[in-house]
Image (cartoon, coloured by chain):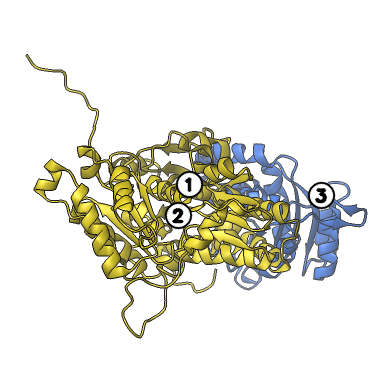
Chain colours: A blue, B yellow
Amino acid sequence: MMEEKYGFPFIRVSYFGIEDVSQALYDVAGHFADAPEIMARTKELVRREITQVQPRLAAIKKALQGKKAAIYVGGAFKAFSLIKALRHIGMSVVLAGSQTGTQEDYEVLRDMCDDGCVIVDDANPLELSKYVIEKKADLVIGGVKERPIAYKLGIGFCDHNHERKIPLAGYVGMLNFAQEVYGTVMSPVWKLTPPKVTSSGRE
Amino acid sequence: MLSEITEEYVVSRNACKLCTPLGASLAFKGIQGSIPLLHGSQGCSTYIRRYLISHFKEPVDVACSNFGEQTAIFGGGANLKVALDNIRRQYKPEFIGVATTCLSETIGDDVPGFIRNYLAMNNPDEVPPIAHVPTPSYRGTHIDGFHGAVKAVVDVLAVNRDRGTDQINILPGMLSPADLRYLKGVLTDFGVPFVMLPDYSQTLDGAPWTEYHRIPAGGTPVTDIARMGESTATLELGRILARQDSAGKLLSQRHGRPCHSLGLPIGVNESDTLFQAIELITGKPTPEKYAAERDRLIDAYVDGHKYVMDARVVVYGEEDLVVGLVSFLSEIGIIPVLCASGGKSGLFTETIKGLVPDYSEKGIQIMEGADFTAIEEAAQDLNPDLIIGHSKGYAMARRLNVPLVRVGFPIHDRVGGQRILHVGYGGAQQLFDRIVNTILEKRQEASAVGYSYM
């Protein structure tokens, strides 16, 4: 709107995950093509920030390698970033969906996801619970209303919404995200929860 | 010539343990119609009374044989005789538990001999049973006094040899009155007759009175203790105690019935072990009430797991209490970065390592025979999120600016120490909620935003 009405240049960016936040910074720096020192400083900034978080992220990736996530968020655009962020810490996505995604969003999602990933639109708790069990998800990412679904089924959960107290955006946000995912997926409390019942019997 | 200066400290600075006869007095308070008698000077009983009263908020009479300078030189035999006479006249007790003190032990008083003479010189039908436990405070801690007293009581009183009952014994160790009530509830709900020793759940957590009582109501009746040898099995709680000389083992040796040594049932795993042991002994299933309580506890663990995962905690207290707490903390994802006790059983480090096999990877420090100065020095470098222990750690918690979750004994700076439930699924639920909420509160108060949801 501001672009249409006032002629302000506009770029669509995401600040979630190391890849997307770095791309966002490069896109902004690239916009100022007549000032190459901005791009030089941006590259330096990205290098510095990544160097700071990478050792801890690598340790978390080692622990989470091969774990599976289900993503169900408000907008599909956030899901794109989350898929990349989860891959960065060794996790695959077995379910992706949103409440408000468009046809084009879902095409992008399909391209991004691994084969066998379930893609859902505007799902209800029954559908979600069916797929997270079937796909043996270790983690659900969603809003507060999805939390009890995950918890009742003995699955870790990370909320990705406006109510958060710990930020997930930017480089520090990526580290917070990784630590939170690690904390919920690797918690020893899952040793005490009852085994899940799938269509082929108890796990 | 100058001697070599060493850094080694032989003094204790702010001890993380209490007097040995204090534990003995507490155990004796769990017998019906009982009076503890300290063979020593008045300060010992005064300090112990002050300590017990501040925690339990109940009258606690502890008699004393009133050593003076002359007694210290000529021995306390005459004093003990007068003390026993006075107690019998004034309190009309059903049981007298004699614990010694540093002074009487150091001068070498032959207390068993004094008691034998006393019994010989009086009509045996008129004298209540007397048990004696040697408790110099320079040997062991209050927990040794406690277990020593329980063993002395069993030794003197558990004399019946009849057979054929399905009754069981439970030796719970040094727990809160709320814990003792919980364990009695479990056995009652299983429908199994039992003798619990000691049981101060009423004597040290009782009702208001219409007139002053010499001895508070409650406690294990002497006649019940006499029948402990008839029981089909004994449950004795404490993983450290399991590897020490104990009342449970004495019962087993003397009466040929098994003693099941379990950990303090703190958290799901150790509580499961207790319930399984009771199922095994009685042949009955765990009552539905406790299965449901366990399910709700696990649901609560799930709801709160993210707030405690990898939280760094300093935990201190009696060795068996710390061992039980470490088992509980490990199952909810908390790292007990420092496990400390003033106890010196020599079994603590090994027992903790057995519970947390990756202790080294997690950087867990274990300190035996530690005082609060040493604990605080170690804690300073560990950046803890939380401290768990009794109220004598408050000064340390305050200096480190880390919240203290109060458990165990003594709790002198809060009400309700006697009502803290540590054991069973119910106890784990209360501990879990308190720990999670303490962490949430700290985070909420540190936030610049006054948010009011999680």
Alpha carbon separation for disc pair 1 and 2: 9 Å
Provide the chain ID for the residue under circle 3.
Answer: A
Q: Earlier in the sequence, mark 1 or mark 2?
A: 2
Label 3 secondary element: loop
Question: Is residue B180 placed above or below B375 in the rendered structure?
Answer: below
Provide the chain ID for the residue under circle 2.
Answer: B
Question: Are labels 3 and 1 assigned to the same chain?
Answer: no
Crowding near pointer 2: few (<14 within 10 Å), some, many (20+)?
A: many
Residue B320 badge: 1
Alpha carbon separation for disc pair 2 and 3: 58 Å
At label 1, the amino acid type is Asp
Question: Are labels 2 and 3 assigned to the same chain?
Answer: no
Residue B454 x %, y %:
55, 68
At label 3, the amino acid type is Cys
Tags 1 and 2 in contact by the CB under 8 Å rule?
A: yes
Left or right of A174 on screen, residue A132: right
Residue B145 x %, y %:
37, 47
Left or right of A17 on screen, residue A122: right
Residue B133 x %, y %:
36, 46
Residue, far bottom: B210
Label 2 secondary element: loop
Q: Which residue is disc 2 drawn over?
A: B174
For residue B127, what is the image quadrant? bottom left
Residue A113 badge: 3
